[in-house]
Image: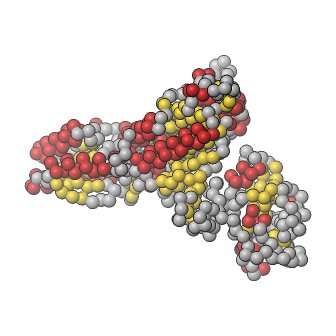
Amino acid sequence: MRFSQLLLPTLKEDPAEAEVISHKLLLRAGFIRKLTAGVYSYLPLGLAAIRKVERIVREEMNRAGAQEVLLPMVQPADLWRESGRWEKYGPELLRFKDRHQRESCLGPTHEEVITDLVRMNVHSYRDLPLNLYQVQTKFRDEIRPRFGLMRGREFIMKDGYSFDADEAGADATYQKMYDAYQRIFTRCGLAFRAVEADTGTIGGSFSHEFMVLAATGEDQVVICQHCDYAANMEKATAREIRSETREQPLPLNRVPTPDRKTVAEVCDFLQISSDRLVKTMIWLADGQPVAVLVRGDHEVQPVKLQNLLGALEVTLADDERIAELTGAPAGFLGPVELKIPLVMDEVVAGMSNFVTGANQADQHLVNVNPGRDFSATHQADIRMVTEEDQCPRCGGKLALTRGIEVGHIFKLGTNYSQALNATFLDDQGQSHPFIMGCYGIGVSRTVAAAIEQNHDRDGIIFPLPIAPMQVIILNLTPKDQEISAEAERLYHELRKQGVEVLLDDRDERPGSKFKDADLIGIPIRLMVGKRFKNDGLLEIRTRADGQTSEATPTAALAVIGEMIAKALNPAGDRP
């Protein structure tokens, strides 16, 4: 590919609309252009990077025994009603009617469609296990699309679905997919972790998210520094906090706390630490109020609370609703004599003689004890893990970091097969629902995540396996015939060797070519200029570390070949 013929409209400044690094750089580098909110056109180099990820995904899916299919993007409402998700999925599901007034949706995912396909065509245990996948455009009508390819409405995704006869088979398939995903993201050249995760709207009993680690990641990830435990904050747990000695309950006392509303203010006033106070917050679960108790230095994890209550949505009540429900102002709430359901974090259950609000302005209660002074409707782990907690597996130190979800695998069980009556006959002629799994990768999102993890002040630093081109040749003196002839020769020689190469043949100053090369992030830069004319030497520069070396043309070609081979096959384990 020649730069002079390439559609690559680079920009000198960050676009005002872009909020995160990957969005800025994808626009500046001329990889994408916005059509409308959350919908982008992929330009040649942007599409080339996406195709690299797709190729790795396909190779590893096929290696793991999965078969590729392509399913319709338009899905009938009847299938979603069968599964029960037509009403549950929410406004992200783009619903519409055709000319015959039949309701349909644009597929955000394909559990219903694949289950329907299999129930119509697979009937015997002899046909199992079965693992099908596709790479396809999805659409989710995000309320606030943002961050470019990180959270758009239309995106490219690999989604796969497995069907097994029993739990043992489903577990084996899940492990195969887990291993395949490990290989995929390793081959993409990314630093990542597989973390335990909530199953969300997909459903199922168990799941892992694959997180690209990046300081700009939108998800918080909990990682043990001593073992392989990792989970996102929605799923993370910690080793149980226990008091060394259980205090004997002391008499309940009411104390004045004038104008002291916050945890810090109350603790300072009463001369206690925040772990001696319990916060009472009013949440609305599908509109119904519930009082939630956590220790003063802890915070509620909304997804844990939502799952505990079986709610579709949980939100914090505003001050007006709090006063209406409790008769007390926010900041002075407590569980004693509160007439709404109580949810207590398990840490609170192990506490004694703690401080709470008294459900009266400027009043708190001292020496509150669960069981004696109040009873909880639910008791469970509903809090966010902190760095002060210990690993639930080994007791080691936990660390909080940021990550970007690029893959998610689920053990679905029979959620969809039972709802859609998708069954097979075993060797005794008995009918059973398929045991299913679901496996997704955000292909376009993976490219954005790679940029979030790999960039500097000058632009993108692509890992070589997913770079749109492997080598860029800079003709630094295009008006010099000898230099231009050598640049052309190297360009053709590299292409002959199967190297993906971009020749910058533009009549531009060297400084402009250097800036564009850094911006678009091609891993290896080969420079042909006066050094070649005077001494017969070329300069090789690696984008990742900025290291520059000199070599003769013959040696340069050999060095580049070795660099590419090492990056594409670091462990000698290609399919």
Residue 55, x across and y down, in percent: 40, 38
Question: Residue at the location (27% across, 41% down)?
Answer: 499
Displayed quadrant of residue 43: top left
Q: Image check: 461 left or right of 15?
A: left
**Does residue 86 appear anywhere in the picture?**
no
**Colouring:** secondary structure
**Does residue 567 appear anywhere in the picture?**
yes
Question: Residue at the location (21% across, 58% down)?
Answer: 549
Residue sitting farthest toward the bottom: 271
Displayed quadrant of residue 495: top left
Displayed quadrant of residue 503: top left
Question: Residue at the location (29% across, 41% down)?
Answer: 500
Front residue (pair 465, 513) = 465
Question: Residue at the location (60% across, 28% down)?
Answer: 125
Front residue (pair 558, 174) = 174
Image quadrant where one finds the C terminus: top left
Residue 343, x across and y down, in percent: 79, 58
Q: Image check: 67 left or right of 324?
A: left
Residue sitting farthest toward the front: 428
Front residue (pair 17, 448) = 448
Give the vertical position of 499 relative to 127 (above or below): below
Residue 244, x across and y down, in percent: 73, 75
Image quadrant where one finds the N terminus: top left
Front residue (pair 465, 392) = 392
Residue 491, x across and y down, in percent: 21, 41
Give the vertical position of 527 relative to 170 (above or below): below
Residue sitting farthest toward the top: 100
Marks counted in the figure total: 0
Q: Image check: 278 left or right of 450?
A: right
